[in-house]
Amino acid sequence: MATFELYRRSSIGMCLTETLDEMVSSGTLSPELAIQVLMQFDKSMTDALETQVKSKVSIKGHLHTYRFCDNVWTFILQDAVFKSEDCHDQVKRVKIVACDSKLLTQ
């Protein structure tokens, strides 16, 4: 499912994927086990976001582009302002990818 790819495109996800690819290529790990590791990574990331992230952030900016494809929303904002309880940051351009977390556990 495309929503699983969200976490794999992060820095830690890319490093994990590269390491698993090297281990499969060298014969250290079977392809089936590498897939199981990636699926566990997706589940762990989803669980961590659901249980450990408690802060709230508001985002305001100019909506440059948006799209909805395969149950995934993508927003590109320009001159976005992020506000939380203790900080206030402005960025020139930000891409936000969002999906229904229930789809990640199916």
Image (spheres, helix red, strand yellow):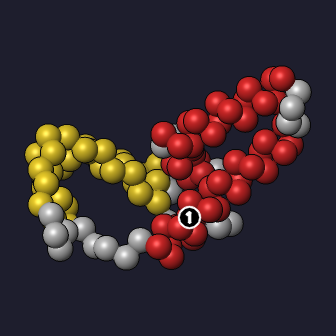
| Residue 38, percent from left and from top | 70, 48
- Residue at 83 percent of width and 23 percent of height: 26
| Number of numbered discs overlaid on the protein picture | 1
| Residue 66, percent from left and from top | 30, 48
Left or right: where 62 falls relative to 70: left
| Residue 9, percent from left and from top | 51, 40
Q: Is residue 28 above or below residue 92?
A: above
Quadrant in the picture for the C terminus: bottom right
Residue 60: tell me if it is visible: no
- Residue marked by disc 1: 46
Q: Residue furthest top?
A: 26
Q: Mark 1 belongs to which amino acid?
A: Thr
Q: Is residue 65 above or below residue 88?
A: above
- Badge 1 crowding class, 10 Å Cα cut-off, few under 14, some 14 to 19, many 20 or more, is some
Nearest the viewer among 32 and 61 is 32
Left or right: where 97 falls relative to 37: left
- Residue at 20 percent of width and 47 percent of height: 77
The answer to which image quadrant residue 105 occupies is bottom right
- Residue at 78 percent of width and 30 percent of height: 23
Indicate the secondary structure of the residue bearing disc 1: helix
Left or right: where 93 falls relative to 39: left
- Residue at 72 percent of width and 35 percent of height: 20
| Residue 3, percent from left and from top | 56, 52
Residue 15: tell me if it is visible: yes
The answer to which image quadrant residue 42 occupies is bottom right
